[in-house]
Amino acid sequence: MKHNIPITLLVLFLCVLPAAAAIQEVTVSGSVSEFSRANNTLTILNPAQYGCTYQANGTPVCSYTPLVITTLTGSVPDESAFSVFSPGDPIVATSLGGIGGHWIAIAKLYGTAPDKTVTNIVGDPSKVKESLAGDYSIKLSPRPDCNACSGTICTAAAANVSILDGKTLRSSGDLTPNGMSTYSGRNDGSSITVTFVKGQASSVSCSEREIMMTGPQPVSVYIVDVVPPIGSGGQAVQTPSATPSGTPPEVTMPADTRPAPTKSAMLPLAPIGAVALVAVLGLSRRV
């Protein structure tokens, strides 16, 4: 006799699964060849694609492998990129939906291999694998506007931005679009400025039930400018401060230094829930 599993039980399995990202991200390195303000594009010369291979013990070995093409073009995340980057600058860039086409993050490299770090980012810093110069780091958490959601993403009403100097938290606070946070409290001439231009956040936290759906992952746009310490490796070049899309930023001073709590999207649970669902369906077919 067949054991029929109630539809309500199947729905329960689906309701515990969160939204899952489905669009490929590709990271490349190279140097700026040229850009076109008219077409809103930046071209990378001699691109090499980032990838990892896994050894028998499971340890990944990651590197950039040169591509057969000599140039790669994509649209920029924000037009401020044209004042941040110049032809010849060594950069890394990440595109969404395949190689090239649309850059969601562009970062300027500083120093010499194997100790290259990043001084400037236009786009989403979470898509940049290299560390910031000067031992700075940032933690970013976009806040969704739950009245402006579609599928897996919502418009970000604000973003919590934390700046760390080594392991020490120096500032933390919410920035509204075009809001800026700066830290320059060291005596080595270094500083870091983060501007939140605009963004997206996961729709998971806006739902009473974490419903399974696939769709685009949230992507935000920030402008990060790091002035490296005096005497550090590489050739430091002061980059003119960029403003998003030509709009003067609203300066926001963080009110306290406590990191705001963030809610995990729990993406790793999606495959587990899917396996459980298959098991239930299999059981319903047994005699």
Image (cartoon, rainbow, N blue to C red):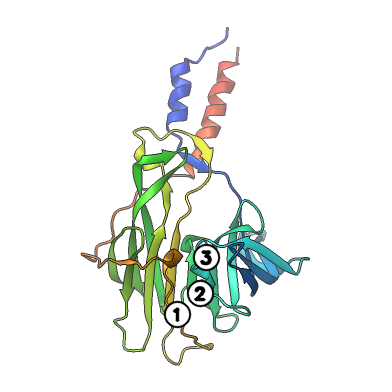
Q: Nearer the viewer, residue 36 or 54?
A: 36
Which amino acid type is marked by label 2? Ser
Q: Which label's residue is closer to the chain start, 1 or 2?
A: 2
Q: Secondary structure at mark 1?
A: loop
Q: Nearer the viewer, residue 168 or 67?
A: 67
Q: Secondary structure at mark 2?
A: helix
**Can residue 50 be seen in this snapshot?**
no
Q: Secondary structure at mark 3?
A: loop
**Residue 240: which disc?**
1
Say which residue label 2 marks.
83
Mark 2–mark 3 distance (CA, rounded to whole Å): 20 Å
Residue farthest to the bottom, as pictured? 231
Q: How far across and down, in percent of the image, does residue 8 sit?
A: 43, 18
Instruction: Give the mark toward the camera: 1 or 3.
Output: 1
Residue at the (44%, 33%) spot, across then down = 211
Which amino acid type is marked by label 3? Val
Image vertical order of residue 12 relative to residue 122, above or below: above
Q: Are marks 1 and 2 in contact (CB under 8 Å)?
A: yes
Q: Which label's residue is closer to the chain start, 2 or 3?
A: 2
Say which residue label 3 marks.
128
- In the shown orientation, is residue 206 left or right of residue 54? left
Q: Nearer the viewer, residue 64 or 33?
A: 33
Residue at the (44%, 73%) spot, across then down = 242
Q: Which label's residue is closer to the chain start, 1 or 3?
A: 3
